Amino acid sequence: MGIGTFFRSFVNAEVLGDEIIRMQVDTYKFMKERNPDMEPHALLALVWTSRMQALGKNVRSELMQQQAYTETLQYSCLPPPTNARALGLWFIYKERPDILERYPRFATEYESLLAPISNAIQTGSFTVCYGRYNPQAAKMMEIEHTSAEDDLNPF
């Protein structure tokens, strides 16, 4: 962030909203450079964890690690870096709803980005959507799901 942007974000909530989004996208790109073999969902969890740590949360707990994956699940179905942008918009919603009220373009963009995910959930194709960008994790979920079904089936 340039010094001018930094100071403008103090007086202009719209600039702050754009800055929140930009920081998540930049963090995602940084994490991708450091972890080139990680799938988008794992990278988004790292971005989420980074944000929570910056807010003073204890991100080392197992609960916070699980929450990182839960809270980023739907965004991991979007292509990078759109996935990180959607996460940034979600942070605005959670942390600064006043920005959404004053600048509805953020809410409109969020709804637009998440429309295909909502559709995938409604049509039952969420796992296909998830597997498009996270094939290894989707395969592991498939194996775990099959194993759980086998445990339930006594035959």
Image (spheres, helix red, strand yellow):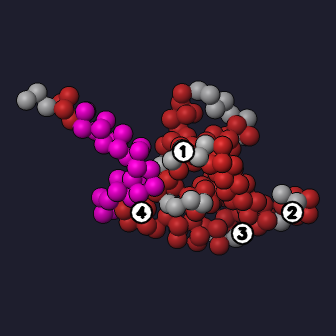
Crowding around mark 2 (Cα neighbors within 10 Å: few <14, some 14 to 19, many 20+) is some
- Dividing the picture into quadrants, the one containing residue 87 is bottom right
Magenta span of residues: 122-148
Q: Say which mark, if any, is on residue 37.
A: 1
Q: Is residue 15 left or right of residue 149?
A: right
Name which of mark 2 and mark 3 comes first in the sequence: 2
How far is the residue under mark 4 from the one under mark 2?
A: 34 Å
Per the image, the residue denoted by label 4 is 118
Residue appearing at x 24%, y 38% in the figure: 146
Which class describes the residues within 10 Å of circle 4: few (<14), some (14-19), or many (20+)? some
> In the visual, does 36 lie left or right of 123?
right
Question: What number is the disc on residue 5?
Answer: 2
Nearer mark to the viewer, of 3 and 4: 4
> Quadrant where the N terminus lies?
bottom right
Q: Nearer the viewer's eye, disc 2 or disc 3? A: 2
**Marks 4,2: beta carbons within 8 A:** no
> On the rendered image, what quadrant is the C terminus found in?
top left
Q: Are marks 3 and 1 in contact (CB under 8 Å)?
A: no
User: 18 or 13, which lies in front?
Assistant: 18
**Which residue is labeled 3 in the image?**
102
- Residue farthest left in this picture: 155
